Amino acid sequence: MTFCEDLFMEGAGLMSSLRGLRGSGRTEKFAVIGCQHPHISIFIEEMLELGYACAGIFEPGDLALAAQLAERYQLELAGSSKELLEEEQVQMIGSSAVNNQKLQIALDCEKYGKHLMLDKPAVVNSNGYSELEELINRGNIQIGMLLTERYRPSLYTLREFVLDGELGELISITMRKPHRLRPETRPAWHFNKQESGGIIVDLLVHDFDLLRWLTGQEIQSVQATMGKRILPQYPDFYDTAAVQTVLDGGVSAQLYADWHAPEKCWTWGDGRIFVMGTLGSAEIRLAGDPAAKLDGEEELLLVMTHEEPLRQVPLRTPSVRIVEDFLNRIEGKPHEFTHQDLLAATGATLLADEQAERVLVYSGKEHIRRG
């Protein structure tokens, strides 16, 4: 099974049947420009379920994933991005392009007045961030990002616990996200920092967003380290990242990601989130926990307080999904994820990446450099 097939099969609900909403009579369409990561399947499936027709998929490079999605959802492959952007009925574009190409797609969408849903990350460096911020501030289009963790039942339920004060005042948050690499299935751009952004930019943007969302606090300071132990043929590909951050309300957080989840892991990795408060603690087991798998669960939320022993908490389903939330923003309705959320998570991630200490370890020898 290839990397694309593997992630496609593991996506949240991506194998579910469409629920009969294609014929809802909507005249608006969507399209996909740039199709390099299976996360775009989330966007495609939700849009189809909501009754939008797809005008087509355009990918200028490797067509493997685009062809797979076109076949699965019975979509057309377009000959150019321009033909999709010029189609009047197309109101929204989705993109999982190579990471350093997404900014140009955003600028093209602004030119043609199309709203844009991006896979993460939106940009890969501070120059790109400045251009993205300027684009957003012009206010001509809405830009979303597939930061899907907010919309997981376990995290949605945890946030309700936090907001209700059941854990007391928050003290610390730890997030661990080991990822399975399978380098032979990855495209070359994945290992090129100029194109991908690297491990902090690519993976930890989810976690910086969650920190702000769970606490209501802003990132105040960060210290980061990236390590490299494998794949010397890709000199700027780092395989571990550890970040220590302090929020402006006093919460401390530790973020960790790597590309070392065991090959035999049945999913992308064994992700865990730990939250400590003055009245209790919580743990989320995301996708790779054996206990959850044995119980037929995809994710678990465990809570313990001064008053109650450790217990598994029934998960609550978010009232809105990520694409629906973005459509609400476009239509001027109440919504959860904002432009400010996108910029704040992106900015914190880029800051951590830019000031990170680099540690190279080969043959037991350690070399440290900064920047």
Image (cartoon, rainbow, N blue to C red):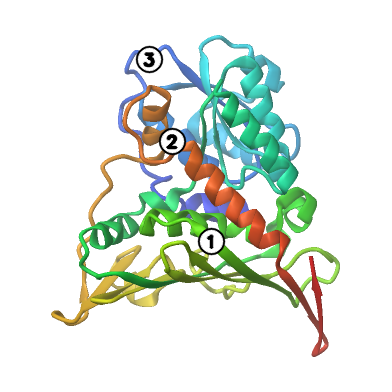
Q: Is residue 29 left or right of residue 33?
A: left
- The quadrant in which residue 109 appears is top right
Whether 78 is drawn above or below 270: the answer is above
- Which residue is nearer to you in this view: 9 or 208? 208
Q: Which residue is mark 2?
A: 45
The secondary structure type at the circle numbered 2 is helix
Residue 103 is situated, as x and y percent measured from the top left of the image, at 68, 35
Asked whether the viewer can see residue 1, the reply is no
The secondary structure type at the circle numbered 1 is strand
- Which residue is nearer to you in this view: 9 or 235? 235
**Residue 220 - label:** 1
Question: Which amino acid type corresponds to the residue marked 3 in the rendered image?
Answer: Arg
| Mark closest to the chain's N terminus, 1 or 2 | 2
Question: Which amino acid type corresponds to the residue marked 2 in the rendered image?
Answer: Glu
Using the numbered discs, state the Cα–Cα distance from disc 1 to disc 2 in whole angstroms. Answer: 37 Å
* Tag in front: 1 or 3: 1
Residue ID at (38%, 22%): 331
